[in-house]
Amino acid sequence: MNKIVIDPGHGGSDPGAVYKGYYEKNFTLEIAQSAVDFLEKIYDAEIYLTRKADESSGLSERSVFANNLKADLFVSIHINAGGGTGFESYIYTNAGSKTKAIQNKIHDFLSQFYKSQGFSDRGEKKANFSVLRNTKMPAVLLENLFIDNPKDLAQLLRPGFIQSLGVIIGEGIAKAADLTPKSITAPDQQPKPDPSPPAPAPTWKPEEEIERLKNEGLIANKHSPNDLVNWGEFAAVINRLLGKISNR
Ligand SMILES: [Zn+2]
């Protein structure tokens, strides 16, 4: 099971629930994108989104998309509204045991996360929702907090929360679908970069440089290239050089 369709609820002309200028469709897209980024980075899986932008997409279009792909799992992401708080999940009214088992895994993982953030688990539910009814593969719909509850909305707006939620949903999907983590190449097995070309051999010859100073009368004695120069010698060389230049 590794072909997953993630469905950011609503979009385009359908904003979903709206409260104080916040649109469900924007939250669902951000959460879904975070889940996809996480899954693609960590797991060997084919992940598809029913929409990648603020686009309109009919409910039947979404299930047809997943059915044509022959996806293994469909996960629809929503934000709740209408008075309440916390998290709940849905499968189709007549869903089979396989779908129920998948709901259990995703739900348990997510509800632990929500409880750790101080939000209640409203339970695993069933409903006759279009995307659940018309998809041929196991399908789960997640209702993440209530957009019209001030505490829930504040949590949705907390910096980093949407990204974390996306990762948690991604990890829940990975557990439910039994995805395999990508194999990581050990550092010493990674291909080594081409060795850089050898540095060109130095063209200067220290002995000849010293010989030239002697020939020019700037030094009196022959020196070894590794000999240290003291200030007296250095000053003498510079002064001889200055004398030569002023005599020109
Ligand atoms: Zn919705």
Image: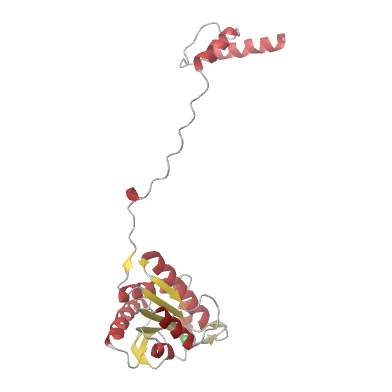
Tell me, yes or no, if residue 76 can be seen here. no
Vertically, is 167 above or below 84?
above
Nearest the camera: 147 or 13? 13
Image quadrant assignment for residue 4: bottom left
Residue 19 vs 238, above or below: the answer is below
Q: Nearer the viewer, residue 67 or 185?
A: 67
Residue 24: image x %, image y %? 51, 83
In the image, 204 versus 77, the foreground residue is: 204
The x and y percentages for residue 207 are 50, 14
Q: Where the N terminus falls, by quadrant?
A: bottom left
Q: How is the image coloured?
A: secondary structure
Give residue 68's position: percent from left, percent from top.
42, 81
Residue at point 41% right, 74% down? 165
- Is the residue 120 above or below the residue 189 in the image? below
Examine the image and state in which quarter residue 73 appears.
Answer: bottom left
Residue 209 placement: quadrant: top right
How many numbered marks appear? 0
* Residue 90 visible to an observer of this rendering: yes
- Residue at 58%, 7% (x, y): give it: 215
From the top left corner, tell me how far across and down residue 113 is, in percent: 35, 76
Quadrant housing the C terminus: top right
In-front residue for pair 205/217: 205
Residue at screen point 51% across, 14% down = 230
Q: Is residue 92 left or right of residue 53?
A: left
